[in-house]
Image: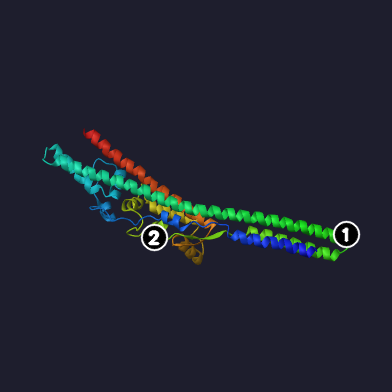
Amino acid sequence: MCGRLLLGALALLLPGCALQRSFTPDPGAHFARECAPPPASAPLPSTPSGTETRESQQIEPFSPRFHRIAAALGLLPLLTKSVALERERAAKKEGAEVGLIRVRQQILARTVLATLEATSLAAVVRCEQARADLLADSLAEKQSKSRQLATVVSLIIESATMIATGGLILAGHEITEGIVALVGGSLAATIAGVSLYQPGRHDFQHPTNLLKEIWENPQQAQYFPGPVWRFLGEPTEVGKSLREQLVASWKELSHIEGQTDEEQRQRFSLLFGTGGTYTIEDLRSRGAMLEMLAAAIDLMHEELELLVREMLLREELKE
C-alpha cells in the first residue's frame, strides 16, 4: 500500500513536468518580421565618405558639435555653398537669392530625413528588445511555475511518507518504516533539487542582427542608415565614438572577457549571429545591449536640435 502511494505521487509529477516543457510561448515569425529594419538605402548625392568628413574645413561661426552632426548628415558641402551664396546675395549678385533658397531647402530636407531615420531605427531596436524581454519573462514564469509544482509534489510525497511510516511503526515494521522514510525523503529532495537547477532555455532567432554591425564595425553598414552610422562612429568629446563606448560597455555587461576561448566563441555566435538557444540570462543581456543601442541612437536627436538651433540663430543674427 505504501509503495503504491509513493508511485502514485511520482506519476502525478511526471505529466506535470511534461506539460511545463510546452508552456513557453514562442514569439511568432510575424513579430520577428516587424522588427527587421529595411536595408540601408543608397547614399544621397554629394554625401561625403568618412575620410572626406574628417578632412572637411570648419565653417565659421558654427560649434564643433555642429560640425560633427553636419558631417554625419553630409551637410558640409551644402553649408559651404550656403555661406558662399550669402556673400553673393549681400553683393546683390543675380540669382544668389534663388540659389540660397534651394540650398537651404536641401539642408532642411536632409535634416528631416535624418531625424526620421534615427526615429525609425530606434523603434526597430526597441522592438527587438521587446522580443528578447518577452521571451525572458515567459521563461522566468515557466521556471517559477515549475518550482511551485515541484514544491507541491515534494510536500505530497513527504506527507505520504509520514503517513506510511506512522502506519508501519504502529504495525511494528521498523525496518520497512526506515526504508519507506529513506525512499520518500530522497525522492522529495531530488524533485526539489531538479526544479531549482532547471535552466530556462528557448530557441530565439534574429537573422537581422543590428548588434553584429556595431560589434564588427564594417566599412558600409547594411542595416544602419548612413547618417546614423556616421553619427555613431564620430569621436565625441571624450575621444571615443558612441560605437566604441557601446562595445566597451557590452564587453563588461556580457562578461565576454575572462572566459575560455570556447565559451567566448559560443557567446559571440549567440549574441552577434543569427540566433540560437538562449537562456534567461542571455536574453536579459541581449535586451540590455539593445536598450543601450537605442539610447545611443536617441542622442542623435539632441545633435539635430543643436544643428537647427545654430542655423536659426545665425540667420537671426544676420538680420
Examine the image and state in which quarter residue 158 appears: bottom right
- Kindly identify which numbered label has been placed on residue 170: 1
Location of residue 59 with respect to 22 vertically, above or below: above
Is label 2 in a helix, a strand or a loop?
helix
* Amino acid beneath label 1: Leu
Location of residue 106 with respect to 224 vertically, above or below: above
Location of residue 286 with respect to 101 vertically, above or below: below
- Kindly identify which numbered label has been placed on residue 216: 2
Give the side of residue 43 with respect to residue 150, left or right: left
- The residue sitting at 52% across, 55% down in the picture is 135
Across and down, in percent, residue 46 comes to 23, 52
The answer to whether any part of residue 167 appears in the image is yes
Q: Quadrant of the N terminus?
A: bottom right
- The residue sitting at 19% across, 45% down in the picture is 81
Is label 1 in a helix, a strand or a loop?
helix
Q: Quadrant of the C terminus?
A: top left
Across and down, in percent, residue 294 comes to 42, 49
The answer to whether any part of residue 186 appears in the image is no
* Amino acid beneath label 2: Glu
Q: CA distance from mark 2 to mark 1?
A: 73 Å
